[in-house]
Amino acid sequence: MKKEIRMKKECITKIYVDGVELNGVRKISFLHNRGRDAYPVLRIELLAEQICLETAQIFALPEVYHPYYVSSDKLVKLGILTHSQLNELLNKKLL
């Protein structure tokens, strides 16, 4: 995945992922701590109503969002969805 950040003379910064501009960027910051295992970190604040993250990492959501989200594993454990139904919804990008 190619990531690119461009700044223009007008102090407008745009972020591109795989050549496509990332819309809704409100704020960015760069962090880089000293040390052998310190990797640079780019933090991006987005204005968005719907966000889909395809990652192996699990992000902690701020407490204000807790009433709006439920674990997919919890839905399966409660019998609301089966594993195959969950996979089908994920494949159709409905979840």
Image (tube, rainbow, N blue to C red):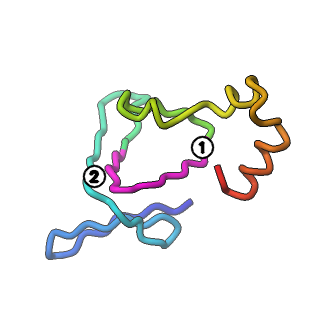
Most distant residue in the left direction: 10
Q: Residue furthest bottom?
A: 9
Of callouts 1 and 2, which one flags the residue occurring earlier in the amino acid sequence?
2
Principal secondary structure, stretch drawn in magenta: loop
Measuring from the top left, give residue 64's x and y in whole percent: 35, 32
Residue in view at x 75 percent, y 23 percent:
77
Is 55 placed above or below 67 here? below
For the residues marked 1 and 2, what is the alpha-carbon distance in whole angstroms?
20 Å
Q: Quadrant of residue 13?
A: bottom left
Identity, as a three-letter code, of the amino acid under mark 2: Ile
Q: Quick check: 45 left or right of 78?
A: left
Dot 2: element: strand
Residue at the image position 64 percent from the left and 49 percent from the top: 95
Q: Which mark is residue 55?
A: 1
Label drawn at residue 47: none
Left or right: where 92 falls relative to 56: right
The quadrant where residue 31 appears: top left
Q: Could you tell me which secondary element the residue under label 1 belongs to?
A: loop
- Picture residue at 45% right of the left edge, 30% below the top: 66
Q: Which residue is mark 2?
A: 28
Query: Where is residue 73 drawn, in percent x and y?
Result: 70, 28
| Residue 21 inside the magenta-drawn segment | no
Q: Which residues are magenta?
A: 42-55
